[in-house]
Image (cartoon, grey):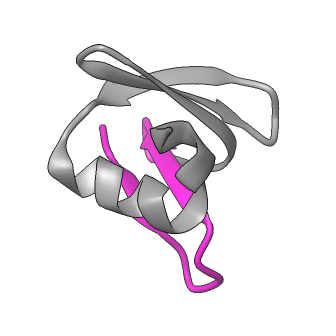
Amino acid sequence: MNLKLDENNKAIFICNGREHVIINAEINGHYIFVTSEDKKLFATPNNEKNIKILNETHPEALI
């Protein structure tokens, strides 16, 4: 499960074929915990691709 950018440059988390717009992200060790607009919490691997997306959409999570 990874993050992706949508056409409006919003971070999207895909889970079971459903897309969730991310409103908050926090890095904790090997995982990135994200909260979606529908108030669901997800964890995704802390990898280069996901960090690149967060850098564009939620740079405060990288501090």
Does 36 appear above or below 12?
above
Residue 28 on image: x %, y %:
40, 15
Does 37 appear above or below 29?
below
Does 54 appear above or below 43?
below
Q: Quadrant of residue 45?
A: top left
Q: Residue at x 23, y 18 (%)?
A: 30
Residue 49 on image: x %, y %:
22, 56
**Closer to the camera in the image, 19 or 9:** 9
Q: Residue at x 55, y 39 (%)?
A: 61
Residue sitting farthest toward the right: 38
Residue 29 on image: x %, y %:
29, 14
Residue sitting farthest toward the left: 48
Q: Residue at x 49, y 46 (%)?
A: 13
Residue 25 relative to residue 43: left or right: right
Residue 59 relative to residue 38: left or right: left
| Numbered-mark total | 0
- Find out whether residue 27 is within the magenta segment: no
Residue 19 on image: x %, y %:
57, 52
Residue 36 relative to residue 9: left or right: right
Q: Quadrant of residue 9?
A: bottom right
Does 41 appear above or below 57?
above
Residue sitting farthest toward the front: 63
The stretch in magenta equals: 1-17
Q: Residue at x 32, y 61 (%)?
A: 52
Q: Quadrant of the N terminus?
A: top left
Residue sitting farthest toward the top: 29
